[in-house]
């Protein structure tokens, strides 16, 4: 199944693991327009890093489909500073959710990876075949190793048991429900918050980490959720599949775009004591384009909607380091 045939979600029970995170909540919103039953588990009710309770929960709730969006996530500094959390929490979540899904006979599982699974100096744009062809970017190798392990688990369950488990690699995401922690967030949320606060304080300049030269591709999370539902319906393979927007720009240009959206008119000062990370991270998304999916949010309109969400959230997610 890669395009022509279809997995029908009608009447299916779909468990979204990590439904409070940016990606999980976007998948829940997107699934609302499918004729399926969406299942979620509150963190207080179920710790997904624990295999026994996860297995019991899945046995009791019997999903047909699992979207594994539960992960410890964060930006370049969080990845750098919390290697144990990023490696071990993510491995624990994968072992627990994927193994339990197999044990209860889940029909389809979609595992979420990340573009950081590809080598630091991978050929650009990065095709799925670049996986394991070179050393990883050191700032996020802990997270990358955990995500590669999750992808390999899906391949292994497919090979050994014929389970229909797939892996999807998103590019850098932004959008509704992001984490706005000043140090631990990804660059879109970090800059939205910093420019907003600088605007209110009439600050003459704002600090942007690194040299401003790294290139990043940004995809709106609601477009990504749409891709996940599309892939649940149309993609079945042991090979991972990339999901990008093609919207690539330097961090300096991205920062200027965010400043415009927020309405901050001061100066940008690059703090080169902070890491740049991977020099370029552009996904080759030709595989998903070939089976008929494309994004439909422009970076400008997506950032404007995200800033609006930030203003409306009233600081709800401002200070937590988030596990979705
Ligand atoms: O979003 P970010 O943390 O993710 O950083 P990565 C992207 C780029 O933005 C880096 C720069 O070059 C940062 O130095 N940047 C500028 C900033 N100002 C800021 C700021 O205030 N905060 C942040 N966070 N960055 C992550 C991985 O790498 O990508 C994760 O660490 C994950 O594991 C994610 O894979 C998608 O693209 O560098």
Image: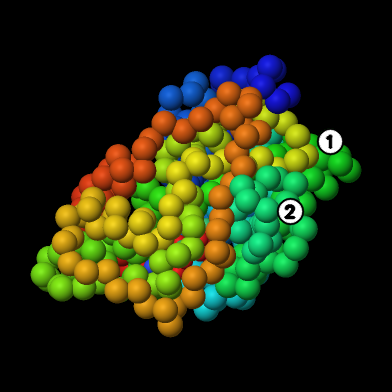
Instruction: Give the Cα distance between marks 1 and 2.
Output: 22 Å
Instruction: Name the residue nearer the viewer: 283 or 101.
Output: 283
Instruction: Name the residue nearer the viewer: 7 or 255.
Output: 255
Q: Is residue 84 above or below residue 127?
A: below
Q: Quadrant of residue 221?
A: top left
Tell me where residue 115 appears, x and y as whole percent. Answer: 60, 53
Residue 102 seen in this snapshot: no
Instruction: Name the residue nearer the viewer: 323 or 235.
Output: 235
Q: Residue furthest right?
A: 160
Q: Which residue shows up at 35% across the image and 56% down it?
A: 253
Q: Residue furthest top?
A: 4
Q: Is residue 253 above or below residue 273?
A: above
Left or right of 71? Residue 92 is: right
| Comparing labels 1 and 2, the label whose residue is closer to the camera | 2
Tell me where residue 113 appears, x and y as whole percent. Answer: 62, 51
Quadrant occupied by the N terminus = top right
Q: Is residue 238 above or below residue 258?
A: above
Tell me where residue 47 appears, x and y as whole percent. Answer: 56, 59
Q: Give SS at disc 2.
A: loop
Residue wearing tag 1: 162
Mark 2: give few (<14), some (14-19) or many (20+) Cα within 10 Å.
Answer: some
Image disc number at residue 82: none
Q: Is mark 2 within 8 Å of ligand 1?
A: no
Q: Which residue shows up at 66% across the image and 33% down it?
A: 287
Image disc number at residue 131: 2
Badge 1 or badge 2: first in the primary sequence: 2
Left or right of 195? Residue 55 is: right
> How many numbered dots are placed on residues in this image?
2
């Amino acid at each position: 199944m890669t395009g022509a045939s279809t997995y029908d979600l009608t009447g299916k029970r779909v468990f979204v693991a990590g439904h409070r995170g940016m990606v999980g909540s976007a998948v829940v919103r997107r699934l609302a327009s499918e004729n399926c039953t969406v299942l979620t588990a509150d963190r207080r009710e179920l710790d997904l890093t624990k295999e026994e309770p996860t297995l019991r929960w899945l046995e009791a709730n019997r999903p047909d489909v699992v979207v594994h969006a539960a992960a410890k996530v964060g930006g370049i500094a969080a990845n750098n500073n919390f290697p144990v959390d990023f490696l071990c929490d993510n491995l624990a979540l994968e072992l627990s959710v994927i193994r339990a899904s197999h044990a209860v006979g889940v029909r389809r599982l979609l595992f979420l990876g990340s573009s950081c699974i590809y080598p630091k100096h991978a050929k650009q744009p990065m095709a799925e075949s670049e996986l394991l062809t070179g050393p990883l970017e050191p700032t996020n190798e802990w997270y990358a190793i955990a995500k590669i392990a999750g992808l390999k688990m899906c391949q292994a369950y497919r090979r050994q048991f014929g389970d229909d488990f797939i892996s999807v690699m998103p590019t850098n995401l932004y959008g509704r429900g992001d984490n706005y922690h000043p140090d631990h967030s990804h660059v879109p949320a970090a800059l939205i918050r910093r420019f907003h606060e600088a605007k209110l304080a009439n600050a003459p300049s704002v600090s942007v980490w690194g040299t401003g030269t790294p290139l990043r591709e940004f995809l709106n999370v609601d477009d990504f959720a749409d891709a996940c539902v599309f892939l649940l319906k149309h993609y079945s393979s042991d090979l991972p599949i990339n999901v990008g927007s093609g919207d690539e720009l330097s961090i300096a240009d991205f920062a200027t775009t965010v400043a415009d959206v927020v309405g901050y008119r001061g100066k940008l000062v690059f703090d080169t004591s902070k890491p740049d990370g991977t020099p370029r991270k552009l996904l080759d998304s030709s595989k998903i384009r070939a089976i008929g999916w494309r994004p439909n949010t422009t970076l400008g309109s997506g950032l404007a909607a995200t800033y609006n969400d930030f203003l409306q959230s009233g600081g709800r997610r401002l200070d937590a380091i988030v596990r979705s």
